[in-house]
Image (cartoon, rainbow, N blue to C red):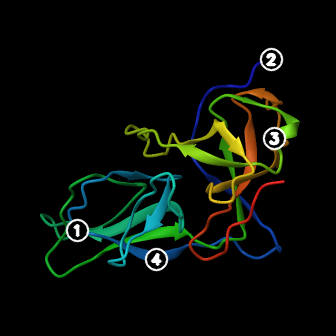
Amino acid sequence: MANLDAPQGFTPVRHISGGVIRTNAYEIANGSGTSIFTGDAVQLLTNGTITLMANNTKPIGVFAGCEYTDQTTGDVKFLKVWTASTTVATNSAVKAYVYDDPDITFSIQCDGTFANTDVGLNSNVTLTAGNTAFGYSKQEITVSTFAVTATLPIRILRLIDEPNNAVGADAKVEVYINNHQLRANTAGI
């Protein structure tokens, strides 16, 4: 049976040393014009806010949702997606929750065919707009970029061992952020 082509971005799997998987709070600029979905890789900007990761940059982690005070109602909202150009209440901040520990591994789908010989290689991310109906990412790792190049942001660890997931097209793999803003990057093997 073929793997299902249903990308959902980065989903936390485990902590390499057995630690606890948790998020830390960052800030999204009020009115930021880029939508960010749960499971999207994000990067920290020089002004201290986060945004959607661009390829050939160092991610800080994976977005897990946000919290802010609604400008109109004054209600505190927790959402799975930051919608582009949202404005929040005056003198309040947008808290973005991010899985930022470099030792967290993630499950993510490949955008093409995965082979066991790809384990240990590094990859770019296919930066696709998220699912607006459900608020989750549709990012995948980019098979055409698999290489030993140290500056590629994602390292492939193994095929995810779960039913209906096999080596081949649209396989889900376990990865970690290789080119992390909190860790030195390394070449693939």
Query: Residue placed at 21% from the left, 58% from the top?
Result: 86
Residue at (68%, 67%) from the top-left corner? Answer: 185
Task: Read off the residue under disc 1.
Answer: 30
Cα separation between marks 1 and 4: 15 Å
The secondary structure type at the circle numbered 2 is loop
Callout 3: SS: helix
- Disc on res. 189: none
For label 2, the residue is: 1
For badge 2, the amino acid type reads Met
Q: What is the C-alpha distance between the residues marked 2 and 1?
A: 46 Å
The disc, 2 or 4, on the residue closer to the chain's N-terminal end is: 2
Residues at marks 4 and 3 touching, judged by CB atoms closer than 8 Å:
no
Q: Nearer the viewer, mark 2 or mark 3?
A: 3
Which image quadrant: the N terminus?
top right
User: Mark 4 or 3, which is nearer the eye?
Assistant: 3
Alpha-carbon neighbours of circle 3 within 10 Å: few (<14), some, or many (≥20)?
A: many
Q: Which residue is mark 3?
A: 118
Badge 2: few (under 14), some or many (20 or more) residues near its Cα, within 10 Å?
A: few
- 90 left or right, relative to 20: left
**Amino acid type, residue under disc 1 in the picture:** Asn
- Marks 4/3: CA distance? 34 Å
Q: Position of residue 186 (x, y in %)?
A: 73, 65
